Amino acid sequence: MMNSHRHPASKSRALASIIMLAGCLLVLSGCETTGFSSLSGSGEQRAERLARTGEHGDAASAYIGLATDAVGSERDRLTLLAVEQWLDAGDVDRAQRAFSDVQNPGSGPLLPIWNTNSAALALYRGDADRALALLEPMSRQSLPLRDRLRVEALRADTWIQKQDPARAIELMTQREKWLDGPAAIDQNRNRLWQGLLYSNPQVLRNAAQTVTDEQTRGWLTLGSLATSTGQQGVGWSNGIVRWREAPRSIPL
């Protein structure tokens, strides 16, 4: 991590459980493409590859380098992509500085990424309600795939922060329907798991007692076990055995 900022779903006393950006959003770009390949040259294709492989700081540098030589809306687009990658890298200060150089487009193809970057920055500040106000309307819109994937992932972050991990699991499970291939699905599940690992074990335990969906209960139960034991010791080992023998299954 490049600075001390925590993940958008990080804990404040009044809000939610802890989740670090490097642990959760780090795999986000590996689950999707940037969606602007029709405008891409070889430089942007390299930035996309870096993003997909989790090299977010390098991807951001590549995008901002391209933005330096661009003008108008193309410069704004590349800058917003750099901001997105810096957020995924956990470099919030640099992301914020670059983001301040781009005006709200108001409408058009750049608005979704402007809004998702705004939502991620709000989550870093612990303002889940502000993030949700941006993301919920977007979830009801017709969006390009890359924007849809990011909206749903950030919505899950928001509900983690608002101490509703069951809702986060539901969103990430639905998100799999838009993913292509087992690697992307594995990354999606790992991302969800990282979120649960930084959640409060009692919150997870309480949620597991109220949900009816067996798969969701499995995620919550295993997450509670992991967070309460640190995934170490006899308690973790015995708990895993009991979990495996239980009449439910989650695809970890």
Image (cartoon, rainbow, N blue to C red):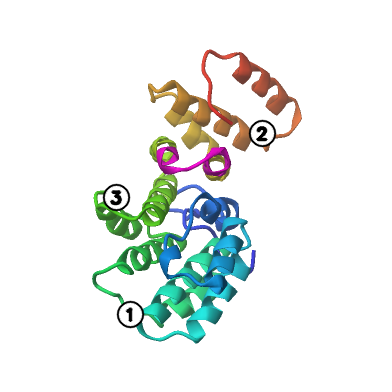
Q: Disc 3 on helix, strand or loop?
A: helix
Seen at 66% across and 34% down, the residue is 229
Report helix, strand or loop for mark 2.
helix
Q: Quadrant of the N terminus?
A: bottom right
Between the C-alphas of marks 2 and 3, the distance is 35 Å
- Nearest the eye: 116 or 42: 42
Question: Badge 1 local density, few (<14 within 10 Å), some, or many (20+)?
Answer: few
First in sequence, mark 3 or 1: give its number.
1
Q: Please name the residue that numbered disc 1 is placed on.
A: 103
- Can the viewer see residue 108 in this picture? yes
Image coordinates for residue 242, horizontal then vertical, percent: 63, 17
Residue 121 in view: no
Q: Amino acid at mark 2?
A: Thr
The overriding secondary structure of the stretch rendered in magenta is helix
Give the amino acid at mark 1. Answer: Gln
Query: Image quadrant for the C terminus?
Result: top right
Bounds of the magenta segment: 175-188
Q: Earlier in the sequence, mark 1 or mark 2?
A: 1
Which residue corresponds to mark 2? 229
Dots 1, 2 in contact, CB < 8 A:
no
Query: Was residue 182 drawn as part of the magenta stretch in this picture?
Result: yes
Q: Residue type at mark 3?
A: Ser
Q: Residue at x 56, y 14 (%)?
A: 246
Q: Residue at point 42% right, 60% down?
A: 35
Question: Looking at the image, which is closer to me, 50 or 215?
Answer: 50
CA distance separating discs 1 and 2: 46 Å
Residue 225 relative to residue 140: left or right? right
Instruction: Identify the disc placed on residue 139.
Output: 3
